[in-house]
Image: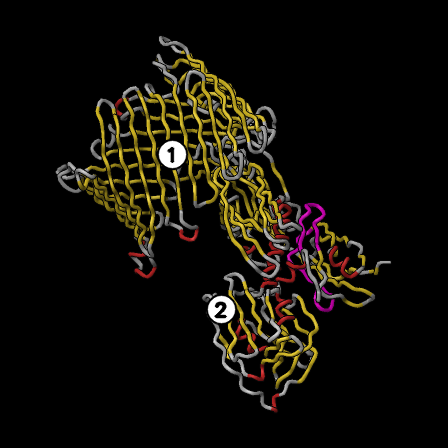
């Protein structure tokens, strides 16, 4: 047997054609039929053959030949394939294959073999039990398991052609995925890193919006105009908007400047002008705010440990959104522990456990990380002060000092104070302190004390994506003129829950909430219970809700039942209905009966245009109210056109427009965008053929047309001049830029830099040209004592960037690799291969550069020398 491990698995799996075994229903009892006697002319002939599982593994076994078919020893075959099985002394073999826990039953006394619900007839001459081993013909066994055996009597081999459905192949695929997971940091490392530029000024962005009603389109309209620019490497922003209708002539103007220093430990953000305050209760002020909190907080917080117990020999993998994020194997006692990378918010993780014989167990867990948590030992501060935006007797000026510290990776403490200066009312000082944490993976706790304000606490239990229970309580101080909280509020509490009977049920779940608010006017209790059920074409959302208690000066005691439905379009409905979404809502009150009803239908009518028509009725109306909404999303503008026809009243309409104009200072061209663009960023440049591979766009170098440029989650195509541009990037934050090699005309054309990290500036385009070079082909041999060595894994490493590619030698020891860009390289042999063959090999260093005859090397040779 040839054991394989490590990176060789990746190359090995390239030779395995991936397929899937057809799932079959659960096994049913087998009824045995007596076997017919074996004719004399089909007596088996003993042979010795090589039994191979694809190119994965193999061994020499005792077998039998009947005519042109080979009878294989099942125990040895199942052991190679890693199928758990049991063979009795009377010739009955039972096995189980995962996933699906499907049973295999083969009995020497029966003429039928069983795999789940699939049965295959077997003639007497093709099954044999001798010397405590059960032999079965390869063709019949292949029919049973969905495999194809290739038998070569001249070479005395029997090979499974496509073993991808066998447990051993799935295990190797998992190991390859783990190898790829371990190499992921290398693949994410950029070749070039470009930090933030800080010009004195650059770029101009103009936002605009207009709302115009049909009854008074000019005087009754409202509008807003925003202006943004990059000044000193920071974002200068001004926004002017009408207050009330345009005929009133009142305009409110806000202006601010925001600077970001990502690598500064003490000052990461400085905001001047009309800015939000620091602290847990942000509010607008006209002054300054400074903090060492990042402009965009990384979504990855750290890691949490999940521990469990299985049997020894098992392995466990953790997946998030289908991506492998961690794995471990059980120790001698069956214990395992996985450090899971966690992000802020909900972290649903799917676990898959694999046994030594292909057994599979699946389960999931959810880890909710509170937004207030900081990484362990992380300290952040915030300081802000200024005038209230519209000074009144309730607030003339305000200030905040905020301190936060990540005590551990599960607990964060916070403290500070809010100060309010007022004219006719007493000033207010509110010191505060809070503790938030995840004491375990399923529990979250949050408590806060605000002096002369509120004492509150919250508790959440969420062991999986199918169950969540949380409750909170707050008690408010009695203040006749509060600043931060609702006047007259005494206390409030709530209890919410979510239950999905099983993850596989998808949209079938229950969701409920019960809350009570007590104030000086009385107490109000609300309750709501929702459910969701989905059929093939319709999703039903029934609900019950109630209100009981005091509201203002009156009392209320009402119970409602409602139903919302969504009709899910299906392609079989035809070209029109398959793109039409229909939704309805109905609500009834226990005493009054039907109180409201509505139905809407929406469908795209052209590219970027969507039309919705609907009708609704409410108790007290004289009839139906009809509505029509046309939403348009074009390259330059976003528009919403609405018409409303209430019963007995004239039809009214409104028009909303929103967009922005962008100026690229480098190219001196104007651009447009359909939404707000102030404090956003863009990237522009050229894709060109870099003939001398110097990374610079020299005169005369040709553009590369229709190349697909990947910028973070966005993409753009180069035009006839090779130019591209993309907008709506987050400023001050690095973004990875790469080129889709499949969009290039020739496979020998590759980007000079595979990945570039660049930080765009605010309110402007940053320039980045992308050089494309002609790549080369390398060829050579791996030899030992002058003879080529097959199946040797090699690593080609870029000595400048550290990027690594893998290749494997052919049967004669030759290797071949195309798409190698100019640069300095080192070619090495895998350490696993060196150890397995007990040899050494010196790394081979060479360079590739453009020449009149192209790029490439064909004289490479790696010599394997025996170890002494």
Whether residue 247 is visible to the viewer of this picture, yes or no, is yes
Point out which mark residue 495 bears.
1
Q: Secondary structure at mark 1?
A: strand
Q: Secondary structure at mark 2?
A: loop
- Residue 862 x/y as whole percent: 78, 59
Disc with the residue nearer the chain's start (2 vs 1): 2
Residue found at x 68% / y 69%: 58
Residue furthest to the front in view is: 90
Residue found at x 31% / y 43%: 631
**Quadrant of the drawing holding the N terminus:** bottom right
Residue found at x 45% / y 29%: 228
**Quadrant of the drawing holding the C terminus:** bottom right
- Residue 847 x/y as whole percent: 74, 52
- Residue 436 x/y as whole percent: 51, 29
- Residue 833 x/y as whole percent: 74, 59
Is residue 813 part of the magenta span, yes or no?
Answer: yes
Q: How many C-alpha atoms fall within 10 Å of the one at disc 1: few (<14), some, or many (≥20)?
A: some
Residue furthest to the bottom in view is: 41
Q: Which residues are magenta?
A: 795-822
Display colour scheme: secondary structure
Is residue 81 part of the magenta span, yes or no?
Answer: no
Return the residue nearer the eye: 802 or 461.
461
Q: How many marks?
A: 2
Residue furthest to the right in view is: 868
**Contact check, label 2 and label 1, Cβ < 8 Å:** no
Q: Which residue is mark 2?
A: 116
Q: CA distance from mark 2 to mark 1?
A: 47 Å
Q: How many C-alpha atoms fall within 10 Å of the one at disc 2: few (<14), some, or many (≥20)?
A: many
Relative to 321, is 419 above or below?
above
Q: Decide if residue 612 is on the left or right side of residue 868.
A: left
């Amino acid at each position: 047997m040839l054991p394989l491990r490590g990176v060789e698995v990746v190359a090995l799996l390239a030779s395995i054609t991936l397929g899937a075994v057809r799932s079959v229903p659960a096994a049913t009892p087998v009824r045995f039929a007596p076997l017919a006697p074996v004719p004399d002319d089909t007596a088996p002939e003993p042979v010795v053959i090589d039994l191979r599982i694809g190119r994965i593994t193999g061994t020499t076994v005792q077998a039998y030949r009947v005519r042109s078919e080979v009878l294989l020893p099942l125990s040895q075959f199942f052991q190679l394939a890693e199928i758990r099985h049991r063979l009795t002394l009377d010739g009955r073999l039972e096995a189980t294959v995962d996933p699906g826990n499907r049973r295999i039953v083969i009995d020497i006394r029966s003429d039928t073999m069983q795999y789940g619900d699939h049965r295959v007839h077997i003639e007497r001459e093709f099954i044999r039990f001798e010397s405590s081993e059960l032999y079965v013909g390869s063709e019949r066994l292949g029919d049973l398991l969905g495999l194809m055996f290739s038998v070569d009597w001249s070479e005395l081999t029997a090979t499974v052609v496509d073993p991808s459905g066998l447990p051993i192949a799935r295990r190797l695929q998992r190991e390859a995925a783990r190898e790829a997971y371990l190499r992921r940091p290398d693949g994410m490392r950029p070749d070039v890193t470009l930090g933030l530029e800080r010009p004195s000024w650059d770029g101009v962005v103009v936002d605009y919006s207009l709302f115009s009603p049909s009854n008074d389109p000019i005087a009754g309209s409202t509008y807003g105009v925003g202006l943004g620019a990059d000044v000193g490497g920071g974002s200068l922003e001004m926004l002017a908007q009408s207050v009330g209708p345009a005929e009133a002539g009142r305009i409110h103007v806000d202006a601010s400047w925001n600077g970001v220093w990502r690598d500064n430990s003490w000052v990461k953000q400085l905001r001047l002008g009309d800015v939000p305050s620091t602290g847990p209760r942000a509010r607008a002020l006209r002054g300054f705010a400074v903090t060492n909190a990042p402009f965009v907080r990384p979504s990855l917080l750290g890691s949490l440990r999940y521990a469990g117990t299985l049997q020894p020999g098992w392995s466990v993998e953790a997946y998030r959104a289908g991506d492998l994020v961690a794995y471990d194997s059980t120790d001698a006692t069956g214990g395992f522990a996985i450090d899971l990378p966690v992000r802020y918010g909900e972290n649903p993780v799917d676990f898959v456990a694999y046994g030594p014989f292909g057994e599979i167990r699946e389960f999931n867990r959810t880890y909710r990380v509170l937004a207030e948590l900081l990484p362990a030992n992380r300290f952040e501060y915030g300081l802000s002060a200024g005038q209230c935006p519209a000074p009144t007797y309730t607030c003339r000026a305000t200030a905040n000092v905020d301190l936060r510290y990540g005590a551990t990776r599960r607990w964060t403490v916070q403290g500070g104070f809010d100060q309010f200066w007022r004219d006719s009312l007493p000033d207010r000082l509110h010191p505060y302190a809070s503790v938030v944490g995840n004491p375990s993976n399923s529990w979250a706790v949050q408590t806060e004390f605000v002096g002369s304000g509120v004492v509150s606490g919250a508790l959440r239990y969420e062991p999986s994506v199918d169950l969540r229970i949380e409750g909170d309580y707050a008690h408010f101080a009695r203040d006749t003129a509060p600043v931060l909280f609702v006047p007259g509020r005494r206390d409030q509490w709530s209890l919410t829950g979510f239950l999905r009977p099983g993850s596989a049920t998808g949209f079938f779940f229950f969701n409920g909430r019960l809350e009570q608010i007590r104030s000086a006017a009385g107490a109000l209790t609300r309750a709501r219970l929702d459910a969701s059920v989905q059929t093939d074409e319709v999703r039903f959302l029934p609900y019950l809700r109630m209100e009981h208690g005091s509201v203002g000066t009156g009392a209320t005691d009402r119970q409602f039942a409602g139903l919302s439905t969504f009709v899910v379009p299906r392609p079989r409905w035809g070209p029109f209905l398959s793109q039409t979404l229909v939704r309805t809502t109905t609500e009834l009150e226990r005493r009054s009966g039907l109180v409201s009803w509505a139905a809407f239908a929406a469908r795209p009518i052209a590219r970027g245009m969507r039309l919705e028509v609907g009708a609704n009725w409410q108790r007290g109306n004289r009839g139906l109210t009809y509505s029509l909404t046309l939403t348009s999303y074009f390259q330059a503008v976003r528009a919403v056109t609405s018409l409303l026809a209430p019963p007995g009243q004239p039809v009214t309409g409104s028009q909303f427009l929103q967009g922005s104009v962008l100026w690229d200072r480098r190219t001196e061209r104007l651009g447009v965008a359909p939404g707000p663009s102030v404090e956003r960023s863009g990237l522009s440049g050229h894709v060109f053929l870099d003939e001398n591979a110097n990374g610079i766009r020299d005169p005369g170098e040709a553009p590369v047309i229709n190349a697909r440029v990947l910028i973070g989650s966005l993409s753009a195509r180069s035009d006839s001049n090779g130019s591209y541009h993309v907008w709506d990037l987050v400023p001050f934050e690095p973004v990875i830029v790469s080129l889709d090699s499949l969009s290039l005309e020739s496979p020998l054309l590759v980007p000079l830099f595979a990945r570039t990290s660049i930080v765009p500036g605010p309110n402007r385009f940053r320039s980045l040209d992308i050089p494309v070079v002609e790549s080369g082909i390398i060829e050579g041999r791996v030899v030992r004592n002058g003879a080529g060595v097959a199946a040797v894994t090699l690593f080609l490493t870029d000595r400048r960037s550290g990027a690594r590619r893998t290749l494997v030698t052919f049967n004669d020891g030759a290797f071949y690799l195309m798409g190698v860009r100019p640069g300095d390289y080192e070619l090495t042999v895998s350490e696993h291969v060196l150890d397995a063959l007990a040899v050494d090999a010196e790394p081979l260093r060479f360079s590739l550069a453009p020449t009149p005859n192209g790029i490439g090397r064909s004289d490479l040779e790696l010599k394997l020398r025996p170890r002494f």
